[in-house]
Image (spheres, helix red, strand yellow):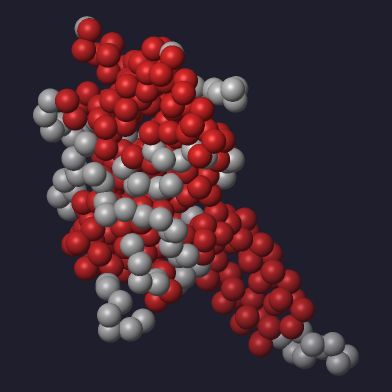
């Protein structure tokens, strides 16, 4: 590691909100987002020596996304792991219930969190992490044509749910 | 005219379609109000997500991360990772540390046996027994950590196109 290589603490200080935001948009709740950021920073800490100067936020978003996808796959393999281990993790499953900002953002977050996983991941990677379609395909392991479809259908669903929310 | 699926509209919006598709989409948009309407809708949804603000990190997060990294460093590169360990799950953390401790104790016991037991009468080395033991545990570790091992390596290559953060 060179003197110019940042420490994980520096990264957390500089890009922590970005990492947490990506994690929160992917996970849809605060507890899981914190866990994702923690595991991502452990990986960052281990990988810093190999980091090639470039877009730090792109690199970080990819790591957070990989942690999320790993965890999603792991939970599918072991469904019981999805059960909450602490009583206080039972209730906050309502999307965005634990982070309230104001106005339209809450509605968008709720609508985003309500999307099926595969649509939400594609939309978040494209519109929050700013991945290209090729990068989304690489990160999720599906063809680019599938990415196109998921992003488009995810946005349509999002639009429908936002419209329904306004109409209520 | 090329047969188009409306799914290409988001790709069009994102500059992710081919030049031929772009020409065909623009021709269709001129004559088909439904396509124009759908384009407007997905644009609105895209802009809504892109307009989401950064989220404040909950208090105590970085302290918990510091503790986790210290613990991971102490446990060594292969002992943590793979599965996300919830910050508030002390039971699980204890289980992990207990398992790691038991594994270390088992290895120590086998190594001690190897050195304490008298050497075999033949020239056969005792190494295969230890190697077999390690092999079993290596296999388990790889099985558990496979996603981390694979993805962490891949993730270090960095993106080919990135952003300046959320817009």
Q: Residue B110 appears in which quarter of the rendering?
A: bottom right
Residue shown at the point (53%, 71%) measured from the top left:
B105
| Residue A75 shows in the view | no
A44 left or right of A80 in image: left
Image: A45 above or below B125: above
On-image quarter of the N terminus of chain A: bottom left
B106 left or right of A48 in image: right
| Residue A107 shows in the view | yes
Total labels drawn: 0
Image: A110 above or below A30: above
Q: Point out residue A130 in the picture as x, y percentages from the top left corner.
A: 35, 46
The residue lying toward the viewer, choosing from A108 and A64, is A108
Residue shown at the point (31%, 42%) measured from the top left:
A128
Residue shown at the point (12%, 25%) measured from the top left:
A103
Image: A37 above or below A95: below
The residue lying toward the viewer, choosing from A115 and B48, is B48
């Amino acid at each position: 590691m060179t003197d110019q290589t940042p420490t994980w603490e520096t990264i957390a200080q500089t890009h922590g909100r970005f990492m947490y935001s990506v994690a929160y948009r992917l996970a849809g709740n605060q507890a899981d987002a914190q866990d994702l950021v923690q595991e991502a920073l452990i990986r960052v800490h281990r990988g810093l020596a190999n980091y090639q100067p470039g877009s730090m936020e792109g690199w970080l978003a990819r790591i957070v996304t990989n942690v999320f996808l790993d965890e999603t796959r792991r939970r599918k393999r072991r469904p019981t792991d999805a059960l909450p281990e602490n009583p206080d993790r039972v209730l906050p499953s309502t999307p965005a219930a634990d982070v309230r900002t104001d106005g339209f953002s809450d509605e968008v977050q709720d609508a985003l969190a309500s999307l099926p996983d595969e649509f939400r991941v594609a939309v978040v990677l494209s519109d929050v992490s700013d991945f290209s379609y090729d990068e989304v395909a690489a990160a999720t392991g599906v063809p680019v044509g599938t990415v196109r479809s998921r992003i488009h259908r995810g946005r349509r669903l999002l639009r429908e749910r936002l419209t329904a929310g306004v109409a209520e | 005219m090329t047969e188009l699926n409306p799914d290409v509209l988001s790709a069009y919006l994102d500059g992710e379609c081919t030049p031929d598709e772009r020409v065909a989409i623009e021709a269709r948009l001129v004559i088909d109000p439904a396509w124009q309407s759908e384009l407007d809708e997905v644009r609105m949804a895209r802009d809504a997500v892109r307009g989401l603000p950064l989220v404040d990190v909950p208090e105590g997060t970085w302290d918990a991360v510091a503790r986790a990294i210290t613990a991971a460093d102490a446990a060594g590169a292969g002992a943590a990772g793979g599965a996300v360990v919830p910050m508030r799950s002390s039971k699980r953390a204890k289980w992990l540390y207990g398992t790691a401790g038991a594994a270390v104790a088992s290895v120590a016991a086998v190594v001690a046996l190897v050195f304490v037991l008298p050497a075999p009468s033949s020239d056969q080395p005792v190494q295969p027994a230890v190697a077999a033991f390690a092999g079993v545990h290596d296999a388990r570790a790889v099985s558990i950590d496979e996603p981390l091992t694979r993805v962490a390596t891949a993730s270090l290559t960095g993106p080919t196109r990135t952003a300046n953060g959320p817009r």
